[in-house]
């Protein structure tokens, strides 16, 4: 006994129909005439499997059909835990705060921690990322030397290694200098120069440039990007976010239309595949601050306020002493724990996008309010596979 998957999509695209299963990420296109014939076969899986066994077997392997009574939500939960929560890639994030920056002593502890992690032989890759205000000020002193030491340690253990830097900018120089000054010194032009320098001299680094702009249009975005050569634009991950989204405007007014406008017109990403993002709590993530407090994720943490730490980096040997209760709570609170999320047929499709928008929009379901469109996501992913 078989039944069609609840995660099947059939999306019109340039005179054809995209067949897409979001649980398996299987996709292909067929003509409208072929689609009409196949859709009739989908209505009777038993007859389909008996009359066209080889064709049905292929659709079954692609995930478009499942065994009767299969709980696909449980399959997704298992897959999510395997691929995300217990991912074997280790992401180490070093975040300098307005109160404190990293020192040489901190870096030595980080090196000891990396060595400990590698000696366990439980990870397949290591990404070390630097974040924080004026993070590029420490590039020559801390970032690049640590990159070299971590790379050598990984090479000895045959573990893939990558370095990544995230910086914040504004497309408005005055706003940037107020938000990201360094002890009263304007940093806008210095930051741009540092980005160009890192990109030109150190192509091994991934760069995520998060632009917090008060408001901007297409012309403003292009003017900003035109400050960099074509090669830089291809290799840097640009994330544009209207500053209003972080100032609680939509939450105060509960203005769904405002968020839809921000998401559809304001937020854009260029080359997102260039960086390794933190989208959910994971076992193999450590976000370390200069005060040796450790967290499991940093997407929504506000390090300017008192934030309860989930662990502490030992000041002697680089061991992380986790608060196991806090860690267990973080890992067990999956974003699709809500029944409406579990029952949603878009669940696998928006595994990385939905929870972020849900939090930003003040608990507003991004799908119900048309902040994101499933068909648009499917077409983009299908086109990315064709290049």
Image (spheres, rainbow, N blue to C red):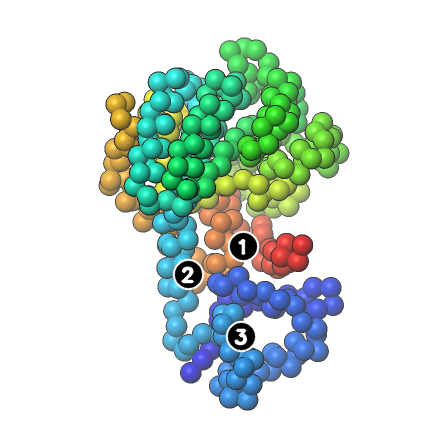
> Which comes before the other along the chain, label 3 or label 2?
3
Task: Give the secondary structure at mark 2.
Answer: helix
Q: Nearer the viewer, residue 85 or 326?
A: 85
Instruction: Kindly identify the residue that appears in the image at 61 percent across and 79 percent down.
Output: 38
Mark 2 lies on residue: 76
For marks 2 and 1, give the one nearer the viewer: 2
Crowd tier of the residue under label 3, counting other residues whose Cα lies within 10 Å: few below 14, some 14–19, many 20 or above: some
Q: CA distance from mark 2 to mark 1?
A: 19 Å
- Contact check, label 2 and label 1, Cβ < 8 Å: no
For marks 3 and 2, give the one nearer the viewer: 3
Mark 3 lies on residue: 59
Task: Give the secondary structure at mark 1.
Answer: loop
Instruction: Kindly identify the residue that appears in the image at 62 percent across and 29 percent down.
Output: 199
- Whole-percent x, y for residue 37 in the image: 64, 81
Mark 1 lies on residue: 367
Residue 173 to residue 150: above or below? above
């Amino acid at each position: 006994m078989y039944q069609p998957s609840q995660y099947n999509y059939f999306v019109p695209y340039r005179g054809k129909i995209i067949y897409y299963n979001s649980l398996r990420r299987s996709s292909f296109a067929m003509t409208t005439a072929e689609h009409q014939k196949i859709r009739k076969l989908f209505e009777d899986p038993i007859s389909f499997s008996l009359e066209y066994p080889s064709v049905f077997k292929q659709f079954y392997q692609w995930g478009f059909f499942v065994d009767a009574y299969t709980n696909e939500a449980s399959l997704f939960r298992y897959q999510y835990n395997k691929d995300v929560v217990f991912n074997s890639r280790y992401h180490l994030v070093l975040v300098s705060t307005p109160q404190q920056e990293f020192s040489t002593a901190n870096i030595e502890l980080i090196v000891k921690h990396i060595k400990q992690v590698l000696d366990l032989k439980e990870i397949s890759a290591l990404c070390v990322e630097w974040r924080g205000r004026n993070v590029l000020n420490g590039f020559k002193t801390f970032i690049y030397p640590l990159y070299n030491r971590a790379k050598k340690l990984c090479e000895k253990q045959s573990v893939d290694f990558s370095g990544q830097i995230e910086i914040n900018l504004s497309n408005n120089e005055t706003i940037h200098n107020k938000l990201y000054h360094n002890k009263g010194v304007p940093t806008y032009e210095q930051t741009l120069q540092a980005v160009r320098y890192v990109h030109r001299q150190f192509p091994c680094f991934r760069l995520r440039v998060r632009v917090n702009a008060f408001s901007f249009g297409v012309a403003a975005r292009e003017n900003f990007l035109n400050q960099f050569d074509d090669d830089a634009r291809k290799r840097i991950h640009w994330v544009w976010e209207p500053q209003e989204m972080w100032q609680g405007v939509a939450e105060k007014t509960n203005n769904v239309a405002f968020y839809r406008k921000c998401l559809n017109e304001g937020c854009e990403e260029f080359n997102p595949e260039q960086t390794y993002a933190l989208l959910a709590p994971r076992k193999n993530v450590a976000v370390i601050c200069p005060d040796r407090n450790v967290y499991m994720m940093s997407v929504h943490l506000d390090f300017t306020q008192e934030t309860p730490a989930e662990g502490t980096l030992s000041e002697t040997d680089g061991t992380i002493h986790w608060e196991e209760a806090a860690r267990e709570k973080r890992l067990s609170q999956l974003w699709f724990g809500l029944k409406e999320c579990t029952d949603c047929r878009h669940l696998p499709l928006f595994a990385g996008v939905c929870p972020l928008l849900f939090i930003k929009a003040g608990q507003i379901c991004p799908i119900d309010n048309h902040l994101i469109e499933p068909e648009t996501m499917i077409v983009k992913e299908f086109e990315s596979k064709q290049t």
